[in-house]
Image: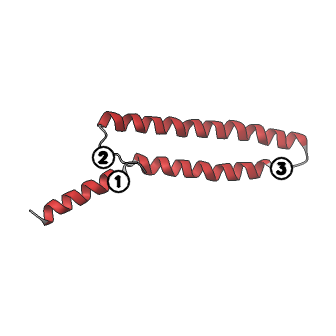
Amino acid sequence: MSDISGLTEEQLAFRRAKATTGLLWHVGVYVIINGMLWFLDLWTGPGIQWAFWVTVFWGVGLLFHVLAWFVDGRQVERRLAQHYLEKERRDNP
């Protein structure tokens, strides 16, 4: 995860918006492409042959993208740094 300590609120908001649109594009492409793959798989042969595996493995990648978006969006590093600074100030007046 990159350093966010020197960013302004506007830069953080832009970064969050960019991450959100990237995730939405990934979800949209996943749904459209996998829908077409399932259609082709069912149309070309009896039952599901290979589309399931594409969907599963790509879904795992999409899950990691969602997790990265969620963790980055919560700005974990920033909150932890603020917590440690406050604790340090309390313990060493």
Where does residue 28 sit, x and y in percent of width and height? Answer: 62, 36
Spatial CA distance of label 1 from label 3 is 44 Å
Label 2 packing within 10 angstroms: few (<14), some (14-19), many (20+): few
In the rendered structure, the answer to whether residue 42 lies left or right of residue 88 reads right
Q: Quadrant of the C terminus?
A: bottom left
Q: Residue furthest bottom?
A: 91
| Occupied quadrant, residue 13 | top left
Element assignment for label 1: helix
The numbered dot on residue 33 is: none
Which residue is tagged 1? 77
Q: Residue at x 83, y 39 (%)?
A: 40
Total count of labels = 3
User: Do the residues under discs 3 and 2 have CB atoms within 8 angstroms?
Assistant: no
Tag 3, which secondary structure? loop
| Label 1: few (<14), some (14–19) or many (≥20) C-alpha neighbours in 10 Å | some
Q: Nearer the viewer, mark 1 or mark 3?
A: 1
Residue 35 horizontal/vertical position (percent) = 73, 39
Type of amino acid at the residue the image marks with label 1: Glu
- Residue drawn at x 18%, y 62% is 88
Q: Secondary structure at mark 2?
A: loop
Residue 64 relative to residue 84: left or right: right
* Amino acid on which disc 2 is placed: Ser
Distance from the alpha carbon under mark 2 to that under mark 1: 8 Å
Q: Label 2 belongs to which residue? A: 5
- Near mark 3 (Cα within 10 A), the count class, few <14, some 14-19 or many ≥20, is some
Residue at the spot 41% in from the left edge and 37% down from the top edge: 15
Q: Is residue 38 above or below residue 89?
A: above
Q: Position of residue 11 (x, y in %)?
A: 35, 35
Give percent across and percent down for residue 45: 91, 45
| Mark identifier at residue 48 | 3
Amino acid type assigned to the residue bearing label 3 in the image: Ile
Disc 2 + disc 1, Cβ < 8 Å:
yes
